Image (cartoon, rainbow, N blue to C red):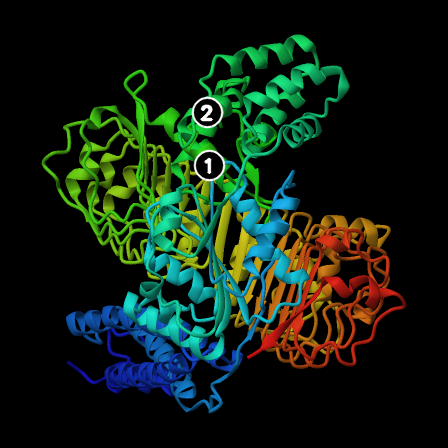
């Protein structure tokens, strides 16, 4: 084989004269093997340094410390470089194979591939070596700042005021270390515990931390430890890898040494739990533990003091019913009789009250009373008998699709909150909601059904996030009673949070149409010979297990599957080719898996309309999707690299209506924005590691602002440097020309970013401001972290003559580790919907854009700041007094 130099300089027949282009870069090819070996070695050195550093950090975190943003940013860069290096090594292996097979005398394309690959290797080697030699601060952690109490949201209360006072008095007695609250489901135990939690905000009690833990019916010590660890600032990717004993030691060390004065609130215990096994130190220290349970026997087993949470008195029950139903004296006699049928249980009263609120005539009220009269009365300790009362609201749902959607919610774990739009996508995928007349109409129907279920008391809105809903535990149990009985030969099988280590025994596979095994320990699905030849399963939820492999036969006998959710199983790296047997599949979710390739059988999933591949960083290619012409939703956010070939595949999907993507190259971003179809349907855009120079805020707005469907924008590790002439036409990303200038800026703000609701900026070193946000009129959430050059969020000069007040719909503002930030906005603003502001490590920010009239509902506002930050803060006249109760400072250990 001739050497590379002679090949490149030769003009012999059949050998292209490419020396004119490559003469200065022969080393890229000739040293490819050596450079690749050096890159592999350097990567191992980098990983070793990272592991050593993280081990030291974790050792300090166990003592209650927290890693610096500098360390976290370096670790994040290492992770990105590691992923990209591994991909490059795979690419280089292919090039090496071609060279060894065909030699340098092969086609020019082989030589150029080697040249390009060699160039990438040297560039990547430089990045790896730079990270190895980077000076990460020796002071790896600083003392953790931890809120003493995190306020828990709750529904309106009736008749609990006196119970709270007496319970609080009992809890504060010196002799009370452990307090159990027991009573029937739906009697208000969780609400009372919530009021106790929040009372620690009002009363100055000498405690270090108040910890709230939701316990599932099947007690999982590991999950309890995770919630406590997260509250104590111990939870991260290293924590997840720890054994139960290691977690126990970490929790014990923090609560004994740095947080000895703690309050632990355990909601909904179904059996006695060992506090020692969790890591709770119960000897010495000043602590209070409160738990709720339905069972008196649990209280006896846990010892300590306990008391029953009694039902509402008749008067309180009637007041609650009339207030919720909106009917007063005209229905008083019927209201009294209906309230008695609810047996003083707040949940039953709330559900029946909402059912009555849409009924205005005496005849309709009597009809509800007659239905209740036909239900069996509640017997002490027999909560199942109350289902007849709760089921009235379900029976009165007017449309069958609303009933089916309610039943579907029983598939999710107890207390599980789910985004409303995600729930609607499940219903559409399942076919409960018809999508043949358009997705917009289908989504509108889904939103309407959720509103109906919330109005009927069958779903509750999550107060912490208005976009999420959940089921009360008793409502869920009622729903499970409905769906777990075989009706017309069909039933649900729901085993969530059950600690399963294998697929459950199913006596009759022919009856099960929907199965949910969420939050278990199932490692795989074997080729079980007990599977029937043909199972009628339509829906299968397997998210958050320990799945590694799925047997081929399982897919072969599940050809009726319509919805399959395998998300949050990080050990899944491949799917069997027999997935092609799922000929009815419409909805597939692989979010959070480490799948590397789509199996060949994937291209036969011709009915697929929804494919979720978000957070699949190992996925190398999705070229097989090009034949899925019915695909309407493709989620590819925070996933593998979007390259030119993928763009072509996306362009071929003529039915695509919703897209989320990740972009890591400027050239790819140009090509994407130059597409006629793709930007119009993009809902989520993740820009990762881009280096862009010469861009201004206005051109940024012009470039991205016309992505009409864009609702979420995230930028991580992007080095965006503005041009010297601010807000000039974009000279770097010339992908879209700025929109025509309307007659005034107010109309222009309606054109750009009209659907953008969430923006996340993380570790973008070149940004000095985010003035383009003045055009995001519907922004609800803004998070900016680790942008060391950012001096202001909105710059007055750049904003120019924009006549629109920004942030009118902003609910959450989170600013952290912004060393140079001095201003959010140059004057006071109105924030009609603001709910939470978090300011962390922003030493130069001394003024918030708030005056005494900026926020209407101050009672619903929470402002979290570092302890000491308030010293020297400048307030508008009257603002400090108005927002005093909304401000919560993090205590330093």
Relative side of 486 to 350, left or right:
left
Mark yes or no: residue 436 visible.
no
Q: Is residue 769 above or below residue 597?
A: below
The disc label shown at residue 790, or none: none
Q: Earlier in the sequence, mark 2 or mark 1?
A: 1
The disc label shown at residue 184, or none: 1
- The image position of residue 241, as x and y in percent, is 31, 68
Depth check, front residue: 815 or 773: 815
- The image position of residue 39, as x and y in percent, is 30, 83
Depth check, front residue: 182 or 482: 182
Q: Is residue 91 above or below residue 388?
A: below
Mark 1 neighbour density, 10 Å: few (under 14) some (14–19) many (20 or more): many
Q: Give the SS element for disc 1.
A: loop
- The image position of residue 44, as x and y in percent, is 28, 82
Q: Is residue 225 above or below residue 752?
A: below
Using the numbered discs, state the Cα–Cα distance from disc 2 to disc 1 in whole angstroms. Answer: 10 Å
Q: Quadrant of residue 383?
A: top left
Relative side of 842 to 53, left or right:
right
Mark yes or no: residue 264 visible.
yes
Q: Quadrant of residue 606?
A: top left
- The image position of residue 482, as x and y in percent, is 39, 24
Q: Which residue is mark 2?
A: 378
Quarter occupied by the C terminus: bottom right
Q: Is residue 131 above or below residue 422?
A: below
Relative side of 421 to 827, left or right:
left
Residue in the image at 47% along x and 86% along y: 140
Residue in the image at 46% along x and 26% along y: 386
Q: Quadrant of residue 698?
A: bottom right
Considering every residue shown, the one lying at the far left of the view is 529
Mark 2 near mark 1, Cβ–Cβ under 8 Å? yes
Mark 2 neighbour density, 10 Å: few (under 14) some (14–19) many (20 or more): some
């Amino acid at each position: 084989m001739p050497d590379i130099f002679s090949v490149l300089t030769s003009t012999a027949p059949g050998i292209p004269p490419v020396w004119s282009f490559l003469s200065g870069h022969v080393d890229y090819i000739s040293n490819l093997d050596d450079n690749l070996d050096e890159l592999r070695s350097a990567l191992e050195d980098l990983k070793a340094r990272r592991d050593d550093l993280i081990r030291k950090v974790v050792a300090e975190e166990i003592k209650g410390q927290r890693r610096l943003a500098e360390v976290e940013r370096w670790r994040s860069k290492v992770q990105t470089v590691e992923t990209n290096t591994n991909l490059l090594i795979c690419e280089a292996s292919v090039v090496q194979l071609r060279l060894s097979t065909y030699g340098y005398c092969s086609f020019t394309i082989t030589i150029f591939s080697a040249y390009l690959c060699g160039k990438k290797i040297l560039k990547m080697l430089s990045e790896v070596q730079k990270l190895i030699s980077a000076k990460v601060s020796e002071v790896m952690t600083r003392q953790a700042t931890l809120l003493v109490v995190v306020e828990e949201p709750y529904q309106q209360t009736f008749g609990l005021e006196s119970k709270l006072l007496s319970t609080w008095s009992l809890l504060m007695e010196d002799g009370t270390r452990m307090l159990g609250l027991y009573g029937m489901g739906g009697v208000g135990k969780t609400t009372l515990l919530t009021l106790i939690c929040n009372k620690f905000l009002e009363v100055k009690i000498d405690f270090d931390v108040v910890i709230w833990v939701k316990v599932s019916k099947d007690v999982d010590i590991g999950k309890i430890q995770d919630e406590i660890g997260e509250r104590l600032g111990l939870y991260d990717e290293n924590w997840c890898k720890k054994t139960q004993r290691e977690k126990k030691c970490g929790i014990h060390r923090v609560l004994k040494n740095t947080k000895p004065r703690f309050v632990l609130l355990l909601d909904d215990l179904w059996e006695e739990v060992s506090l020692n096994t969790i890591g709770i130190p119960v000897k010495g220290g000043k602590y209070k533990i409160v738990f709720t349970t339905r069972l008196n026997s649990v209280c006896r087993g846990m010892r300590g003091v306990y008391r029953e949470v009694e039902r509402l008195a008749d008067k309180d029950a009637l007041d609650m019913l009339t207030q919720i139903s909106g009917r007063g004296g005209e229905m008083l006699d019927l209201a009294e009789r209906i309230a008695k049928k609810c047996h003083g249980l707040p949940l039953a009263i709330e559900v029946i009250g909402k059912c009555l609120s849409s009924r205005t005539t005496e005849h309709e009220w009597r009809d509800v009373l007659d239905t209740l009269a036909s239900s069996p009365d509640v017997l002490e300790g027999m909560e199942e008998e109350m289902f007849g009362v709760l089921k009235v609201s379900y029976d009165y749902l007017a449309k069958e699709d609303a009933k089916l959607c309610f039943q579907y919610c029983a598939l999710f774990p107890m207390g599980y909150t789910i985004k409303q739009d995600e729930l609607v996508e499940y219903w559409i995928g399942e076919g409960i909601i018809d999508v043949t007349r358009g997705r917009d109409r289908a989504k509108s129907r889904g939103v309407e059904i959720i509103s109906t279920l919330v109005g009927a008391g069958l779903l509750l809105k999550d107060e912490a996030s208005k976009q999420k809903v959940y089921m009360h535990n008793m409502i869920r149990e009622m729903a499970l009673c409905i769906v777990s009985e075989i009706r017309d030969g069909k039933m649900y099988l729901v085993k969530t949070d059950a600690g399963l280590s294998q697929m459950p025994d199913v006596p009759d596979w022919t009856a099960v149409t929907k199965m949910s095994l969420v939050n278990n320990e199932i490692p795989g699905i074997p080729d079980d010979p007990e599977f029937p030849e043909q199972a009628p399963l339509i829906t299968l939820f397997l998210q958050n297990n320990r799945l590694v492999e799925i047997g081929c036969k399982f897919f072969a006998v599940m050809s009726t599957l319509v919805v399959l959710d395998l998300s949050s199983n990080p050990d899944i790296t491949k799917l069997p080719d027999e997935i092609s047997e799922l000929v009815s599949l419409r909805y597939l979710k692989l979010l959070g898996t480490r799948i590397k390739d789509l199996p060949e059988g994937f291209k036969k999933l011709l009915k697929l309309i929804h494919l979720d591949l978000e957070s699949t960083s190992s996925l190398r290619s999705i070229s097989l999707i090009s034949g899925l012409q019915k695909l309407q939703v493709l989620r590819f956010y925070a996933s593998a690299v979007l390259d030119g070939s993928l763009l072509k595949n996306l362009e071929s999907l003529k039915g695509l209506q919703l897209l989320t993507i990740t972009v890591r190259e400027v050239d790819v971003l140009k090509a994407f924005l130059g597409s006629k179809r793709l930007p119009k349907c993009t809902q989520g855009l993740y820009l990762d590691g881009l280096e862009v120079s010469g861009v201004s805020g206005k051109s940024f707005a012009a470039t991205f602002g016309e992505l009409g469907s864009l609702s979420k924008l995230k930028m991580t590790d992007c080095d965006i440097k503005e041009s010297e002439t601010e807000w000039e036409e974009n000279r770097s990303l010339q992908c879209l020309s700025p929109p025509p200038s309307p007659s005034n800026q107010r109309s222009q703000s309606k054109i750009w970013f009209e659907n953008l609701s969430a923006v996340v900026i993380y570790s973008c070193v070149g940004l000095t401001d985010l003035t383009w946000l003045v055009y995001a009129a519907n922004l609800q959430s803004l998070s900016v972290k680790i942008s060391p050059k950012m001096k202001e969020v909105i710059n007055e000069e750049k904003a120019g003559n924009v006549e629109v007040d920004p942030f009118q719909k902003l609910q959450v503002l989170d600013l952290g580790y912004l060393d140079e930030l001095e201003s959010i906005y140059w004057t006071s603003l109105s924030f009609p919907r603001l709910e939470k502001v978090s300011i962390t490590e922003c030493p130069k920010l001394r003024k918030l854009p708030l005056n005494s009239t900026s926020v209407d509902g101050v009672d619903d506002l929470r402002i979290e700041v570092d302890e000491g930050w308030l010293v020297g803060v400048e307030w508008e006249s009257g603002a400090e007094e108005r927002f005093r109760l909304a401000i919560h400072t993090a205590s330093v250990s």
